[in-house]
Image: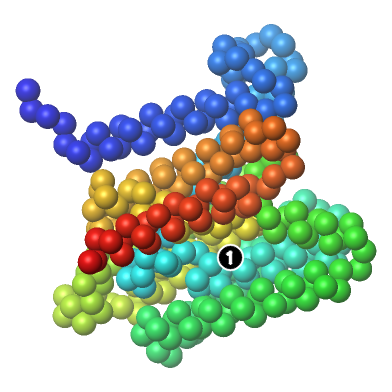
Amino acid sequence: MKPLPKTTIAYGGLFILLAFVSLLSLKAGPATLSFGDVFTGLFGSGDPLLETIVRDLRLPQLLLGLVVGGTLGIAGASLQALFKNPLAEPGVIGVSSSAALGAVIVLYFGFAGFTDIALPLAAIGMALLAMSLLILVVLWDVSVLTLILAGVALNSFAASLTALALNLSPNPFAFNDIMFWLMGSLSNRSLADLTLILPFIVLGWGVLFAATRPLKATVLSDEAAHSLGVNLKLTKIMVIIGVALSVGASIAVTGVIGFVGLVAPHMVRPLFGHDPRSIFIPSAMAGALILVGADVLIRILPHGGNLRIGVMTALLGAPFFLYYVIATRRAMR
């Protein structure tokens, strides 16, 4: 019997882990449920309280974790391929901080109290504004270095304005709202939140997937890609648009979540290779696994309910990435 390909086994392993963590996400929480309770709450009819806990509270949180984690994984893989830099992640081009700034403005001025969609729309709008500025930079100068420097400048500017809003916060309640939102969270989100951002995310996924073929040609060098007929300017614009749409929309609901986009592609490259198209779906699965797993960990830890998911992903991601750096240095010797 012919053995299964390594990638098929890897896909199966990722799927099993993701399914198991997803079940834990529906099971874990202040009201601990059995697996039977989870299935009854999802598909059965009976106890209204059980259905409310599973369908209305935990299922939206799980779906949001899967979608946002997958988005961050895809965005990280795309940016690392574009910049040919293992440190690249959604924050590197200023999209994360710009989207965060849009939400902070809404919280600072109290616009969030007028309508539930004010905060998501402001975050998406600022991400699109940042995208537009970066596209102008690419049209002026196509080099990756210029794009990185523009992204760093944009990131610093947005972060400075966010810090200014915190410094000038009119009252402690607004300060707390901004701080808690900036640390990221999946809790207290509904299917309506996911429905609002999903069109932007799916559109961003489509643009990033379309960019994977030309990105494959840029892995060696921009000169080699150009000789193969790749339009470097269009490729960079596609990645910027895809990241801005998908990550900006994600941050609009969850707040800022770091390290997922940085770590997820590195987890799957040893199994699936370095081709951007080959690791597109695995990076999404790894990102979803990290984010949902971190959310489950918060809920099962003693007093973990006070932790924010952005803090947890940083606590999990920083040691992993430090290990990756050390292992890479040893391999280069």
Residue at (73%, 35%) from the top-left corner? 303
Q: Nearer the viewer, residue 331 or 167?
A: 331
Q: Amino acid at mark 1?
A: Ser
Q: How is the image coloured?
A: rainbow
Residue at (24%, 53%) from the top-left corner? 273
Q: Which quadrant is the N terminus positioned in?
A: top left
x, y (%) of residue 194? 61, 44
Q: Say which quarter of the image contains residue 188.
A: top right
Crowd tier of the residue under label 1, counting other residues whose Cα lies within 10 Å: few below 14, some 14–19, many 20 or above:
many
Q: Say which quarter of the image contains residue 56.
A: top right
x, y (%) of residue 146? 43, 86
Q: Which quadrant is the C terminus positioned in?
A: bottom left
**Which residue is tagged 1?**
96
x, y (%) of residue 47? 72, 11
Q: Quick one: which residue is furthest to the bottom in this view?
A: 140
Q: Nearer the viewer, residue 10 or 305?
A: 305
